[in-house]
């Protein structure tokens, strides 16, 4: 079933953590709440779970209002960052505890626990206590405890943050598979954009208690709604530079560091302010010869090898540096005279006053 929140707000004293949110989590989709620490994503998840009461607003599960219900009456399952396993119970008892509390007969309970353990590949661990398990095994047990109940809504609060990098990569794929197996609506909280981009059907990017953009991972990456989303999504982060919108021979151009380049054709520039913020991802920056038309000259400030790629930071004006991500074979000498060039179709433009992306021709971004 879907989850809908309407006018949802939450304050702790004078601190307003969530600010009148309206959004719908579609049925059987994997939706991630993504944002920096303190943006309100965990508070929102806890309110959906019933662990926090709203200051204002309503929560609906499949059209049924639930914000007045206790967590036990919402048919949700939640996996926490800390796993929250019972240390005196073995794995089988931990997984089946929720069923036991609900009065499920022992034989049926054992069958359900065994089925979930098989899916999670922890069948050989059922007699062990949590202290005898690795971090990844404990995480699987926590997932199993949630899965065994067949919840309507599956909630996860940074469940992979305590795992090492290799295991996190493995568990990302497994969590997505579990979601598909459960055929339920999953809401996942993280500050890790890689988790959000690789696992999600939809991503809600949050900041300061507001959903800045709610869209597919592709839309969030390719068409960020504002400067915050553009700077938060992507690694290495997007380059930003102040530019001037002008006209040469009747055609719109952007002036950057004393050079003019064609204005991006995908934006509606009618009524746009003369001062704009240009954004370009390092992957869309090309190294060029200083004499190349429309290239922006500069000097190499820093280089960094990152495996098969190399980051080259070019200073094009005082305190203005543009980072290019290129193949590792591309060499660059510190202080060498170089230039950077951009494909106009890959550029982003923002209003410096509001921070919002300029409207595009033939389409609009979905913001929160």
Image (cartoon, grey):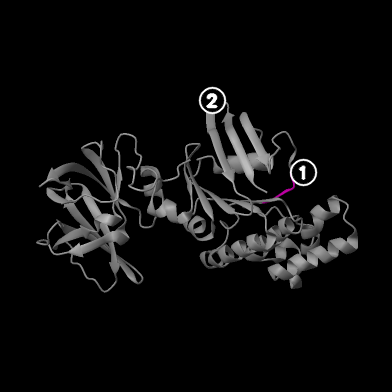
Badge number at residue 14: 2
Residue 246 place in picture, x, y as percent: 16, 42
Question: Whole-Å distance between the Cαs marked 2 and 1?
Answer: 30 Å
Q: Give the answer, above or below, for where 56 lies relative to 337.
A: above
Please tell me which residue is depicted at 39% across the width and 55% down the height of the picture: 234
Task: For residue 2, say whether it is visible.
Answer: yes
Q: Is residue 205 above or below residue 166?
A: above
Quarter-wise, where is residue 355 in the image?
A: top left
Provide residue 15's location: percent of width, then percent of height: 53, 29
- The local crowd at label 2, few if under 14, some if 14 to 19, many if 20 or more residues have their Cα within 10 Å, is few
- Nearest to N terminus: mark 2 or mark 1: 2
Magenta stretch contains residue 188 = no
The extreme top residue here reads 14
Q: Give the structural element (helix, strand or loop) at label 2.
A: loop
Say which residue appears at 30% left-offset and 38% top-offset: 351
Left or right, residue 131 beside residue 258: right
Q: Secondary structure at mark 1?
A: helix
Bin the neighbour count of mark 1 within 10 Å (Cα to Cα): few under 14, some 14-19, many 20 and up: few
In the image: residue 16, left or right of residue 111: left
Q: Which mark is residue 72?
A: 1
Q: Is residue 128 visible?
A: no
Q: Which residues are magenta?
A: 72-78
The image position of residue 339, as x and y in percent, is 16, 60
Residue 152 point in image, percent of width and height: 71, 50
Q: Nearer the viewer, residue 359 or 102?
A: 359
Q: Does residue 240 sit above or below 327 in this rendering?
A: above
Which mark is in front, 2 or 1? Answer: 1
Instruction: Examine the structure image and report whether residue 75 is included in the region drawn in magenta.
Output: yes
């Amino acid at each position: 079933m879907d989850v809908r929140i309407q006018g949802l707000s939450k304050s702790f004293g004078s601190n307003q953590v969530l600010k009148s949110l309206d959004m719908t989590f579609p049925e059987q989709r994997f939706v991630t709440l993504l944002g920096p620490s303190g943006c309100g994503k965990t508070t929102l998840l806890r309110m959906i779970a019933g662990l926090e009461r709203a200051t204002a607003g309503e929560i609906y599960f499949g059209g049924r209002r639930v914000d007045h219900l206790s967590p036990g009456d919402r048919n949700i399952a939640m996996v926490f960052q800390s796993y929250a396993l019972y240390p005196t119970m073995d794995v089988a008892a931990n997984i089946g505890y929720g069923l036991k509390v609900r009065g499920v007969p022992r034989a049926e309970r054992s069958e359900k626990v065994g089925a979930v353990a098989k899916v999670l590949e922890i069948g050989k661990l059922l007699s062990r206590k949590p202290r005898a398990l690795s971090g990844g095994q404990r995480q699987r047990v926590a997932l199993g405890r949630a899965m065994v109940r067949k919840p309507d809504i599956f909630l996860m609060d940074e469940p992979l943050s305590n795992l090492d990098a290799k295991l996190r990569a493995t568990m990302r794929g497994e969590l997505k598979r579990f979601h598909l197996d459960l055929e339920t609506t999953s809401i996942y909280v993280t500050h890790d954009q890689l988790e959000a981009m690789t696992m999600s059907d939809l991503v809600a990017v949050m900041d300061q208690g507001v959903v800045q953009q709610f869209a597919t991972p592709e839309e969030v990456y390719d068409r960020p709604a504002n400067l915050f989303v553009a700077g938060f999504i992507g690694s290495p982060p997007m380059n930003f530079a102040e530019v001037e919108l002008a006209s040469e021979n009747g055609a719109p151009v952007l002036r950057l560091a004393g050079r003019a380049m064609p204005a991006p054709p995908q934006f509606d520039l009618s009524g746009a302010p003369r001062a704009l913020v240009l954004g370009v991802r390092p992957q869309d920056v090309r190294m060029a010869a200083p004499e190349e038309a429309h290239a922006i000259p500069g000097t190499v400030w820093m280089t960094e090898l990152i495996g098969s790629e190399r980051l080259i930071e070019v200073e094009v004006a005082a305190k203005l540096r543009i980072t290019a991500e290129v193949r590792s074979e591309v060499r660059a000498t510190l202080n060498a005279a170089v230039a950077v060039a951009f494909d106009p179709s890959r550029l982003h433009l923002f209003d410096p006053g509001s921070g919002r992306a300029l409207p595009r021709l033939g389409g609009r971004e979905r913001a929160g």
